[in-house]
Amino acid sequence: MNSPPDARRQHDRIQKAIPAMITVGRHTVAATTKDLSLGGMFFFTDVLLLQGTELEIVLMLPKQVGLPESRMVCCHGRIVRVEISHGQPGVAAQIEGIANLPLA
């Protein structure tokens, strides 16, 4: 018997639309998060991405996800699910590593 997805999560997920830049290989595209946590996120983009693909995500991670303060970060992760909603690709990504970016 499978557990509901929320029961398997190790981190609290917050609903927040945050602009992000997604890099897959040599291509970078804009995206907007729907929800996120320290362990993963769901975002919308205009480009169809494939499940299993490694990616980097640059965004301002809010302190609400468990950080002492909001920080610009680069997350390394992997796409675990892709779904189309109202003609736009939605992507669930598992975060495998987070690096703080220098402040401007």
Image (spheres, helix red, strand yellow):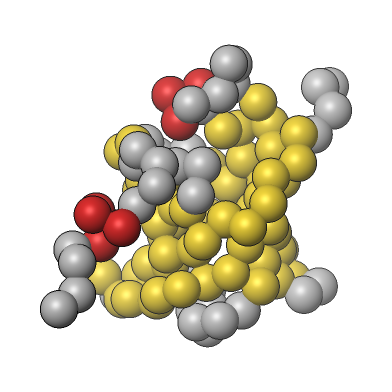
Residue drawn where x is 84% and y is 22% of the image = 104
Left or right relative to 43: residue 49: right
- Identify the residue at the far left of this view: 1
Quarter of the rendering occupied by the N terminus: bottom left
User: Which is more toward the observer, 25 or 97?
Assistant: 97
Determine whether, in the image, residue 76 is placed left or right of residue 11.
right
Residue that appears at 31% across and 76% down? 84
Residue at point 58%, 16% (across, down): 68
On screen, residue 53 above or below 102: below
Left or right of 29 in this view: 62? left
Q: Percent from the top left, x then y, of residue 99?
A: 75, 41
Residue 8 seen anywhere in this rendered image of the structure? yes
Q: Is residue 51 left or right of residue 86?
A: right
Instruction: Give the residue displayed 39% in from the left and 47% down from the top.
Output: 10
Query: Quick check: 33 above or below 89?
Result: above
Q: Where is 67 relative to 21, above or below?
A: above
Residue extending furthest toward the top:
68
Does residue 33 appear in the picture of this structure? Answer: no
Q: Position of residue 93 (x, y in %)?
A: 49, 63
Residue 83: x and y in percent read: 33, 76
How many numbered discs sit on the rendered protein? 0
Q: From this view, report whether residue 96 is shown above or below residue 15.
A: below
Camera-side residue of 49 and 38: 38
Residue sitting nearer the eye, 72 or 39: 39
> Which residue is the extreme one toward the front?
1
Residue 89: image location, x then y, percent: 39, 72
